Image (cartoon, rainbow, N blue to C red):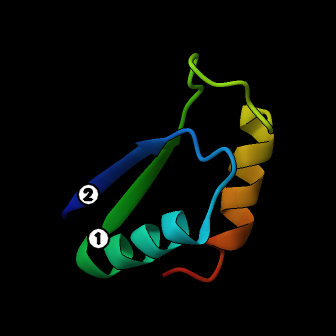
Amino acid sequence: MTRAIYPGSFDPATYGHLDIIKRAAALFDEVVVGVLNNSAKSPLFSVEERVNILENITKDVP
């Protein structure tokens, strides 16, 4: 089993992030997306909101 880990702040999540997730899903058995806080930035969305956004936009990614 191959696993990829994709960490980032995803604040906000973009089409570029989604493209990377889709490409990784085609290459690896599992893709773990780690949503983190970046202390150098003022967040637009809370971590919980960013997780929800990513879950919604990736729901059709195998």
Q: How far from the left and from the top, in percent, is residue 53?
A: 75, 57
Question: Please, what secondary structure does the residue beneath circle 1 have?
Answer: loop
Residues tagged 2 and 1 counted as in contact (Cβ below 8 A): yes
Q: Determine the image quadrant of residue 24.
A: bottom left
Q: Residue at x 72, y 24 (%)?
A: 42
What amino acid type is highlighted by mark number 1?
Asp
Q: How many marks?
A: 2
Q: Determine the image quadrant of residue 20.
A: bottom left
Q: CA distance from mark 2 to mark 1?
A: 6 Å
Marking on residue 29? 1
In the displayed structure, would residue 13 be above or below residue 62?
above
Few, some or many residues within 10 Å of mark 2 (<14, 14–19, 20+): few
Left or right placement of residue 19 versus residue 6 in this view: right
Specify the farthest residue to the top: 39
Q: Residue at x 19, y 64 (%)?
A: 1
Marking on residue 50? none
Left or right placement of residue 50 versus residue 36 in this view: right
What amino acid type is highlighted by mark number 2?
Arg
**Mark 2 or mark 1: whose residue is earlier in sequence:** 2
Residue on which disc 2 sits: 3
Q: Residue at x 62, y 83 (%)?
A: 60
Q: How far from the left and from the top, in percent, is residue 2?
A: 19, 62
